Image: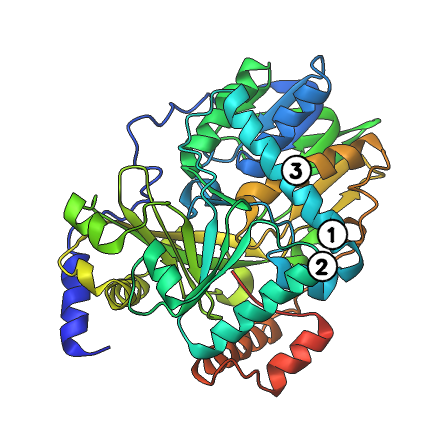
Amino acid sequence: MAPVAMRTAARSLSDARPVSFWLDDPGKPAALPALTTTEKCDLLVVGGGYSGLWTALLAKEREPDRDVVLIEGREVGWAASGRNGGFCAASLTHGLGNGLARWPDELATLERLGERNLDAIEEAVARYSLDCDFERSGEIDVATEPHQLDELAEMYEEARRLGLADGLELLDRDAVRAQVDSPTFLGGLWDRRGVAMLHPAKLAWGLKRACRDLGVRIFENTPGLELVSVGSGMGVRTPYGRVVARRVALGTNVFPSLVKRVRPYTVPVYDYALTTEPLTPEQLASVGWKNRQGLGDSANRFHYFRITADHRILWGGYDAIYPFGGRVSAERDHRPETYLTLAEHFFRCFPQLEGVRFSHAWGGAIDTCSRFSAFFGTAHQGKVAYAAGFTGLGVGATRFGADVMLDLLAGERTERTELKMVRSKPLPFPPEPIAWAGIGLTKWSLARADENGGRRNLWLKAMDRLGLGFDS
């Protein structure tokens, strides 16, 4: 980073609050009391992020008389559900390319189910009056290097061949800059309907309210400590009490699963983001962005960015930090060196916004798995279900995962449970120090590919053949 660019980036961060912009909201609801008794219920949901909230809500929609309890280790939406970029994608497979590589025979079905899932989220926002700034504005994947133009064109042609190009539009340099103006943009692929923008914390808080209105009993500051069989059901011990339930759904994602054999399938990845102060009308005019799409560049070390309801730009991504040993720690929620890199990249993308300052800077852990998309399963003779490994696209896909868990707990064969994606597992990550070394080599190789026209080295080609990878 050049000295002048570094000074500009550093100055822009001088007033940034070290907290998620989304969670720094006066409308944040008060925490509910912790569990201090022994409770019995039909279904216990462990985890108060999107995965757990959608599971509790859909369980009550399916069976209004079902007694549902949800426990959350801290407060609803405090972790990845309240810290992400607010992109709600229809894709269940972490994008068309990943789905095509892994489940080509059922990709059309997965795309259809993903579209239906996003439609259902939009319907739930309306039905439950979820005030979460939901906008079905789509997303543009932008090319910032010549080789990325070829990759986007190939993806568009592949989508057309498969009959999946409805709503997709390939944009040249002038067309993409007419949407959002950056001198770094060379072209783009606009998915007009497959992605919505929303306020992620408000979605979590709205789902919390909707669950309670349907009769779900929610206990916050109540971590699940141990899972054991109790007669024909299951019990989960908490610090001050316990819950005995006929069935249990685990939506703990990045945090260690109460089913220990599931833990090797995921590792935590720390992701970081910034938001600017609200842009002035003149600053907004300089970038355009009238259609309010989400954007992401096409590099391996990619940025995601979007505009908020109050005209801030959220700018995140690039660094994906894996901690040795896979331990989740609040100490890693902030990384000043990454904030500085992100700020410098922001002004490279939008030089016309020089002088803009950042209001918030934050980070946090998400769970990734080696196939980049969620996996599912049951334990304890089908009395426990889990979904994990959403890898950065959980805002939308967790609702689908909730439906899968409820199908599995009911013992039902459905279109969802018959999917190869649902019936298979990713390859587990190896133990340390092999995981650390392998992930480090993969990250280095991805960075080299970005610098060398997208050409993948022998290590990445070997990982591709094995179906292994590392992504956020």
Q: Is residue 178 visible?
A: yes
At 65% across and 19% down in the image, what residue appears?
39
Quadrant of the image occupied by residue 67: top right
Q: Looking at this view, is 378 or 294 the one in front? A: 294
Q: In the image, 183: left or right of 65?
A: left
> Disc count in the image?
3
Instruction: Read off the residue under disc 3.
Output: 116
- Amino acid residing under circle 2: Leu
* Callouts 3 and 2 close, C-beta under 8 Å: no
User: Residue 54's spot in the image, x, y percent?
Assistant: 60, 31
Q: Looking at this view, is 419 or 259 the one in front? A: 419
Name the secondary structure under disc 2: loop
Q: Residues within 10 Å of mark 1 (few under 14, many from 20)?
A: some
Q: Given this view, does label 3 or label 2 mark the residue nearer the observer?
A: 2
Instruction: Read off the residue under disc 2.
Output: 162
Name the secondary structure under disc 1: helix
- Amino acid residing under circle 1: Ala
Q: In the image, 126: left or right of 166?
A: left
* Callouts 1 and 3 close, C-beta under 8 Å: no
User: Residue 163's spot in the image, x, y percent?
Assistant: 70, 55
Instruction: Read off the residue under disc 1.
Output: 108
User: Residue 413's spot in the image, x, y percent?
Assistant: 86, 37
Q: In the image, 49: left or right of 416?
A: left
Tell me the number on the disc at residue 130. Answer: none
